[in-house]
Image (tube, helix red, strand yellow):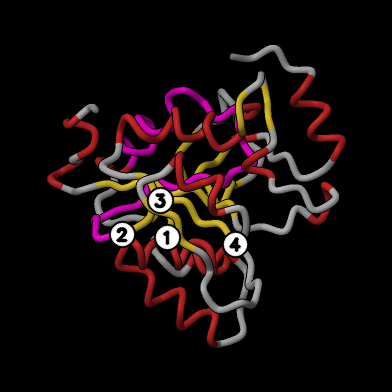
């Protein structure tokens, strides 16, 4: 574990993976458990996050028995109602006692090798910010480095009837981390076509 990166400006960083979706465009598949190069999507992402963080938390709403061996802690949205990725993020933040949570969704197994390092350096340059990835064409609102203290903000936002991740981020000191040199690393596998694109990629 890289202690220098884990403790940016004295901060403690945990890792979180959002795997609570319904996989509705992939015939209900649990995307974190799909395989690429013979390895579950979730394991690819864990490999990118875990060396730079204190503990790993996975948010899922099914198949928790398959996620437990991969994580230090597994949590669900907890209310029986699927409220989308913000609810998953809230459950991760509530489960952590760190200062920041480094987050990725479960459906981007080609995540850049330097994802954690660049996000943490961006935080060093922007203390107190909420960091999200910009791939040069669009923002990726679930690839985050986010203050754990914002769990209450999400609760209030959801209680107001809002669900839009981007709107919430813009209300919470959003700073973008530039990954325009590696946009392919943030391919979200949400459909059979995107899954096929990933399968055709020879990336390791």
Q: Residue at x 45, y 66 (%)?
A: 91
Task: Tell me which segment is drawn in magenta.
Answer: 96-122
x%, y% of residue 32?
62, 42
Q: Are marks 2 and 3 in contact (CB under 8 Å)?
A: yes
Q: Which residue is mark 4?
A: 61
Label count reads 4
Q: Residue at x 65, y 27 (%)?
A: 184
> Could you tell which of marks 2 and 3 lies nearer the N-terminus?
3
> Could you tell which of marks 1 and 3 lies nearer the N-terminus?
3
Q: Is residue 24 left or right of residue 167?
A: right
Examine the structure image and report whether residue 98 is included in the region drawn in magenta.
yes
Q: Which residue is mark 2?
A: 96
Q: Residue at x 53, y 63 (%)?
A: 88
Q: Which residue is mark 3?
A: 57
> Could you tell which of marks 2 and 4 lies nearer the N-terminus?
4
Q: Are marks 2 and 1 in contact (CB under 8 Å)?
A: yes
Q: Quadrant of residue 86?
A: bottom right
Circle on res. 129: none
Looking at the rendered image, the quarter that the C terminus falls into is: top right
């Amino acid at each position: 574990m890289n202690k220098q990166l884990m403790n940016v400006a004295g901060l403690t960083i945990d890792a979180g993976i959002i795997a609570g979706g319904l996989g509705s465009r992939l015939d209900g598949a649990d995307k974190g458990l799909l395989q690429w190069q013979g390895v579950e999507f979730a394991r690819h992402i864990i490999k990118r996050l875990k060396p730079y963080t204190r503990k790993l938390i996975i948010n899922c709403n099914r198949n928790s028995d398959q996620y437990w061996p991969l994580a230090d802690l597994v949590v669900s949205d907890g209310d029986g109602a699927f409220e989308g990725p913000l609810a998953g993020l809230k459950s991760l933040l509530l489960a952590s006692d760190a200062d920041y949570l480094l987050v990725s969704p479960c459906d981007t197994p080609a995540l850049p090798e330097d994802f954690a390092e660049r996000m943490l350096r961006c935080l060093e340059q922007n203390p107190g910010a909420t960091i999200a990835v910009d791939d040069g064409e669009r923002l990726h609102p679930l690839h985050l480095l986010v203050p754990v203290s914002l769990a209450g903000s999400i609760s209030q936002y959801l209680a107001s009837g809002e669900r839009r991740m981007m709107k919430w981020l813009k209300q919470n000191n959003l700073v973008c981390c530039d990954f325009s040199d590696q946009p392919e690393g943030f391919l979200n596998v949400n459909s059979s076509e995107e899954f096929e694109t990933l399968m055709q990629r020879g990336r390791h």
